[in-house]
């Protein structure tokens, strides 16, 4: 293990500026004096007043990238530190992850050296530890099922079968389904006993399969007796979910027999509450290897979630191989001190990259399809396109003034320009390759967070607006998205997007599904306009949000504090009028990766809230029980 030669400590206090101030201290742990250097750190709490710092000179910022110089002539001897303060912040720090996420120094010879960073401390007050987020839990029925079924009338037995096995005469499709769920459970619980065997066992219990067209799609019924179990279903998804429930029941009874039991008699009748039960993953801010993506899909299947929304592009990187534009996954993914994309959100001295080849994508899509999970790919356009425009500068209007607008994240001129004709050729080629890779009915095009004022300094955009008789950023965005929707329609795909797709006149509501993320009320407004809606409000379903008020709790806070109890209790239907409820297609968790610098942070923020959303997506409102959920959720797998 390499020992850090330098470390950056930081504190925040509420006075000293409109949004408080940072105090940074760089410690020289090396054996030689340090001079003639520059310091870089990345932080979501951005500097907006270059002059509001003391004992340092602010050199430049690009979104979350910040560069400073020490006072002229400073020489930092071994064991000594240099401190400086920054008070020109765009918002106050509220949690320990609001400080520096990574750092490095650039030496006088141009070499970049990593600097270790510590979590942000709150100056002048005890940093309280985060609270316990789950109650002890309480069961009325000793069964380990999550999400909880729609109806259960089963009697617990005193023991459990060693294994479940298909009855003689089971079809090849039934055997394959058993094998699929058997492999799923073994991947998620590698050292646990297998729940199924394809061969009969005298210590096991026979499992019979029955096709029943009266059962709703994705639904199933389990009938238990001391000698056999009958699984009834009408489609492949329902059969899989029934098998998954059996695997969960056995896992709980075997791993915690003092708490959980296996049914000896009775029935479970089950069906999902919503057709769209989704989970989104942002792989642009942080890259997740193929194995991690497949494991997350495994967890979704275990929780009976059926949509994986794959956020493949953003300002920070373009992660999908497009053979027509190899620059997207060379130039458009590399972040580093000397790369076209500067370090962001945890990147330091070493360049980082990562993308999914088309071979990777086909592998992941096939993995998901085998588990009845549909992958909805997203390329985020027209905003959030810094990586795209860096890789393909011909997509810019060369006459547009640099930094004529900034996104909410601080990126300059980051939106694909509707006035550049090459933009549409680019998108046609990208979509041609995407529809070959993804069989999904929807293709998500983003449409979010285009800064008001975008393109207004572009002569090409101005010319287009004059030709079309439109004015303003959002009317131009609407024009652009209508053209994109036509491209999708021509390819047999429906448009999905974030709620801002409706801005400026939006696109036609038919065959358009929008995700309400800014607040719950937006979903009702979209439904009134005729759009199909998926509810994913940041105030309940964004899994990067902090879970408690404590300063030591990690995560984002723009949508408030989102403890698991709130996520579980939130009702997506909310105040939806009865005549609009048919527009509500379902719910979705969103995993944004700005704060997920480690697997530990990922698991801490995503769980138990992802299972909570899975239960809200599946279980009827009248059957939800927070204390029962808390008793069962520790059994669930993590990434």
Image (spheres, helix red, strand yellow):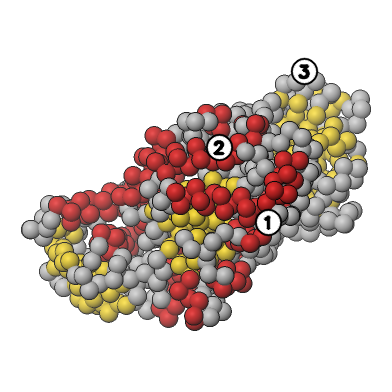
Q: CA distance from mark 1 to mark 3?
A: 49 Å
Q: Nearer the viewer, mark 1 or mark 3?
A: 1
Q: Nearer the viewer, mark 2 or mark 3?
A: 2
Residue sitting at the far top: 109
Residue located at (67% from left, 51% from top): 468
Q: Which callout, 2 or 3, points at the residue further toward the start of the chain?
A: 3
Residue 164's spot in the image, x, y percent?
18, 59
Task: Assign a secondary structure to mark 2.
Answer: helix
Q: CA distance from mark 1 to mark 2?
A: 21 Å
Task: Assign a secondary structure to mark 3.
Answer: loop
In this view, 486 is above or below 634: above
**What residue sits right under mark 2 in the picture?**
426
In this view, 371 is above or below 508: above
In the image, 448 versus 42, the foreground residue is 448
Q: Is residue 183 left or right of residue 504?
A: left
Q: CA distance from mark 2 to mark 3?
A: 40 Å
- The answer to whether any part of residue 136 appears in the image is no
Residue 411's spot in the image, x, y percent?
72, 43
Counting every numbered tag in the picture gives 3
Residue located at (54% from left, 45% from top): 379
Asked whether the residues under the numbered discs 1 and 3 touch, taking CB atoms below 8 Å apart as contact, a structural biologist would say no
**What residue sits right under mark 3 in the picture?**
109
Residue 12's spot in the image, x, y percent?
80, 52
Q: Which callout, 1 or 3, points at the residue further toward the start of the chain?
A: 3
Image quarter hosting the N terminus: top right
**What residue sits right under mark 1 in the picture?**
475
In the image, 452 versus 73, the foreground residue is 452
Q: Is residue 414 left or right of residue 218?
A: right
């Amino acid at each position: 293990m390499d020992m850090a030669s330098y470390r950056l400590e930081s504190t925040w206090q509420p006075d000293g500026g409109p949004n408080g101030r940072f105090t940074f201290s760089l410690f020289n742990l090396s054996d030689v004096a340090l001079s003639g250097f520059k310091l870089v750190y990345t932080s979501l709490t951005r500097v907006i007043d270059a002059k509001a710092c003391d004992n340092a000179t602010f050199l430049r910022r690009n979104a979350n990238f910040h560069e400073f110089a020490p006072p002229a002539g400073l020489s930092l001897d071994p064991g000594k530190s240099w401190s400086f303060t920054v008070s020109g912040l765009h918002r106050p720090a509220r949690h320990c992850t609001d400080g520096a996420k990574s750092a490095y120094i650039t030496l006088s010879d141009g070499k970049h050296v990593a600097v270790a960073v510590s979590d942000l401390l709150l100056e002048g007050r005890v940093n309280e530890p985060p609270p316990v987020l789950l109650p002890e839990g309480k069961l009325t029925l000793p069964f380990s099922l999550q999400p909880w079924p729609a109806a259960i009338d089963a009697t617990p037995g005193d023991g459990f079968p060693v294994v479940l096995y298909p009855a003689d005469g089971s079809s090849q499709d039934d055997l394959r389904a058993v094998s699929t769920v058997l492999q799923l459970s073994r991947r998620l619980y590698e050292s646990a006993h297998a729940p199924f065997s394809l061969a009969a066992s005298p210590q096991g219990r026979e499992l019979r399969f029955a096709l029943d067209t009266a059962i709703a799609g994705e639904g199933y019924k389990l009938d238990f007796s001391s000698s056999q179990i009958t699984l009834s279903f009408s489609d492949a998804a329902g059969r899989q979910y029934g098998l998954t429930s059996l695997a969960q029941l056995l896992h709980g009874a075997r791993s915690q027999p003092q708490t959980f039991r296996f049914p000896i008699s009775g029935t479970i009748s089950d069906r999902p509450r919503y057709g769209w039960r989704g989970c989104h993953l942002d792989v642009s801010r942080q890259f997740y290897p193929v194995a991690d993506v497949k494991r997350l899909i495994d967890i979704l299947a275990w929780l009976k979630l059926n949509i994986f929304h794959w956020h493949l592009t953003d300002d920070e990187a373009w992660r999908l191989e497009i053979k027509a534009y190899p620059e997207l996954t060379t130039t458009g993914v590399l972040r580093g001190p000397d790369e076209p994309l500067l370090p962001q959100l945890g990147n330091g001295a070493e360049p980082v990259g990562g993308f999914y080849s088309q071979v990777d994508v086909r592998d992941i899509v096939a993995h998901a399809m085998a588990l009845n999970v549909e992958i909805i790919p997203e390329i985020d356009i027209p905003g959030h396109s810094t990586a795209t425009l860096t890789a393909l500068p011909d997509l810019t209007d060369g006459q547009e003034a640099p930094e004529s607008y900034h996104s909410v994240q601080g990126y300059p001129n980051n939106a694909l320009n509707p006035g550049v004709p090459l933009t549409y050729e680019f998108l046609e080629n990208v979509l041609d390759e995407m529809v070959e890779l993804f069989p999904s009915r929807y293709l998500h095009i983003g449409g979010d967070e285009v800064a008001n004022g975008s393109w207004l300094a572009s002569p090409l955009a101005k010319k287009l607006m004059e030709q079309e008789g439109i004015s303003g950023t959002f009317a131009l965005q609407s024009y652009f998205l209508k053209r994109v929707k036509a491209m999708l329609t021509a390819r047999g795909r429906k448009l999905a997007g974030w709620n801002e797709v409706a801005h400026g006149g939006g696109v036609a509501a038919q065959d358009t599904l929008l995700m309400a993320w800014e607040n719950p009320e937006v979903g009702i407004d979209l439904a009134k306009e005729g759009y199909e809606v998926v509810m994913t409000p940041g105030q309940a379903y964004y899994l990067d949000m902090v879970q408690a008020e404590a300063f030591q709790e990690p995560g984002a806070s723009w949508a408030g504090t989102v403890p698991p109890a709130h996520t579980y209790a939130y009702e997506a239907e909310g105040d939806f009028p009865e005549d609009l409820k048919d527009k509500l297609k379902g719910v979705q968790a969103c995993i944004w990766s700005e704060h997920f610098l480690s697997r530990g942070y990922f698991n801490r923020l995503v769980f138990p809230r992802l299972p909570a959303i899975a239960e809200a997506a599946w279980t009827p409102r009248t059957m939800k029980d927070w204390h029962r959920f808390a008793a069962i959720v520790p059994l669930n797998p993590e990434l």
